Image: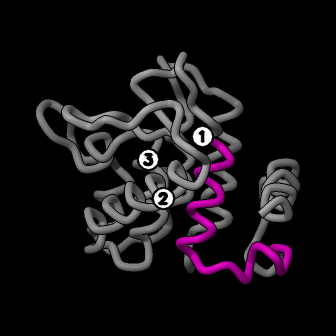
Amino acid sequence: MVKCFLVIMSLVLACTVSKAELPLSIARLPLFERAVAVVRHFEGWHGPRHHPYVGYGHRLRPGERYSHRMTKRQAEALLRKDLMERCAVFRRFGKDSVLLAALSYNVGVYRLLGGGRLKKSRLVRKLEAGDRDIYREYVSFRMYRGKVLKGLETRRKVEFALLFVP
């Protein structure tokens, strides 16, 4: 796993990576495993000061009894469970479901699919129309409170490079 993180860090430095240029160690991982690695890397560990988030970014739901004292193994199992749930939500998007699941882990499902007063994102509308030229729309989820954050931009570029299936 340490090699995976080193590879991801090298991708951070060269954010415009094509599938052909990916190092074999990360390119050989199954798509879902790549998603787990990239989310785990960018979310980092959430301790007591990050409440209501625990483990690798799991947001506690009403009635859940997870604690910041969980082990890394428990946190990774919870991350996998969360990503599988999100993949199921985006199943209708086929090979883009893992990419959308990874994005929604950070921004929320509602920001992509809409709900309440929020409209569907341009990203989802484009995919529903059959247009898979979504790089710009995907990387546009790099802002917080109206400002572009370099760390989020890097995360989106790495996620897209590792998880987009042409």
Asked if the residues shown at circle 3 and circle 1 are in contact, with their CB atoms under 8 angstroms apart, the answer is yes
Outermost residue to the left: 116
Please tell me whether the stretch drawn in magenta is mainly helix, strand or loop.
helix
Eye-nearest disc, 2 or 3: 2
Q: Position of residue 108 (x, y in %)?
A: 35, 41
Mark 2 = which residue?
Answer: 77
Q: Is residue 65 magenta?
A: no
Residue depicted at x 62% and y 36%:
45
Q: Which residue is mark 1?
A: 43
Quickly name the residue at label 3.
105
- Callout 3: 10 Å neighbours few (<14), some, many (20+)? some
The residue range painted magenta reads: 22-42
> In what element is the residue under mark 1?
helix
Whichever of callouts 2 and 1 sits on the residue coming sooner in the sequence is: 1
CA gap between label 2 and label 1 equals: 15 Å
Give the spatial CA distance, label 3 vs label 1: 9 Å
Q: Residues within 10 Å of mark 1 (few under 14, many from 20)?
A: some
Q: What amino acid type is highlighted by mark number 2?
A: Ala
Closest to the observer, 1 or 116: 1
Side of 86 where 34 appears, left or right: right
